[in-house]
Amino acid sequence: MLTVAAAALVAVVLTGPPPSSTPADLTSAAGRVLAERTRDVGALADPATLASCLVRAGVPAPDGPLLAGRPVRVGVTEGTLLVIGTGIRGRVRAVVPTLDCTSVLADLVLGG
């Protein structure tokens, strides 16, 4: 079941290659990076760095592995879309910390 925030369709623009000027909701963006197996997350590919970033941003560390990710823009703020496994088949967490890991722009659980 999608959260209320997911139902509101947070507007996200993918900013990494390939360029996109078409707004897409976070659910679609997460599905796209999963389908493409994109892992353009820089230092956040390291599990310890990822966990540290999310905790510093004020959200729980991931329960599962990083599955996909890429740079995004939420409104006018740059961040990194991270699609993380939850340990539950068919369910992922899509979280977007700011580039400096000081806050979270979006944090949704998607899927069954």
Image (spheres, helix red, strand yellow):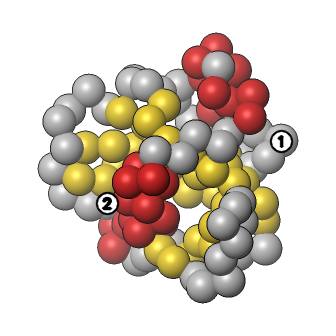
Q: Nearer the viewer, residue 19 or 60?
A: 19
Q: Position of residue 24 (x, y in %)?
A: 51, 77
The tag on residue 100 is 1
Q: Can the viewer see residue 72 in this picture? A: yes
Q: Position of residue 68 (x, y in %)?
A: 49, 42
* Quarter holding residue 35: bottom left
* Quarter holding residue 85: top left
Instruction: Determine the residue located farthest toward the bottom in the rendered image.
Output: 22
Q: Amino acid at mark 1?
A: Asp
Asked whether the beta carbons under mark 2 and mark 1 sit within 8 Å of each other, the answer is no
Name the residue located 77 percent from the left edge and 60 percent from the top edge.
Answer: 78
Q: Position of residue 94 (x, y in %)?
A: 46, 49
Where disc 2 sits, the SS reads loop
Instruction: Determine the residue located farthest toward the top in the rendered image.
Output: 48
Mark closer to the chain start, 2 or 1:
2
Name the residue located 44 percent from the left edge and 36 percent from the top edge.
Answer: 67
Question: Which quarter of the figure is the N terminus placed in?
Answer: bottom left
Q: Amino acid at mark 2?
A: Thr
Q: Nearer the viewer, residue 22 or 87?
A: 22
Where disc 1 sits, the SS reads loop
Front of the two marks 2 and 1:
1
Q: Nearer the viewer, residue 83 or 55?
A: 83
Name the residue located 33 percent from the left edge and 43 percent from the top edge.
Answer: 92
Q: Is residue 77 left or right of residue 55?
A: right
The tag on residue 3 is 2
Q: Is residue 60 left or right of residue 91?
A: right
The tag on residue 20 is none
Q: Residues within 10 Å of mark 1 (few under 14, many from 20)?
A: few
Q: Can the viewer see residue 53 in this picture? A: no
* Quarter holding residue 64: top left
Q: Position of residue 30 (x, y in %)?
A: 44, 57
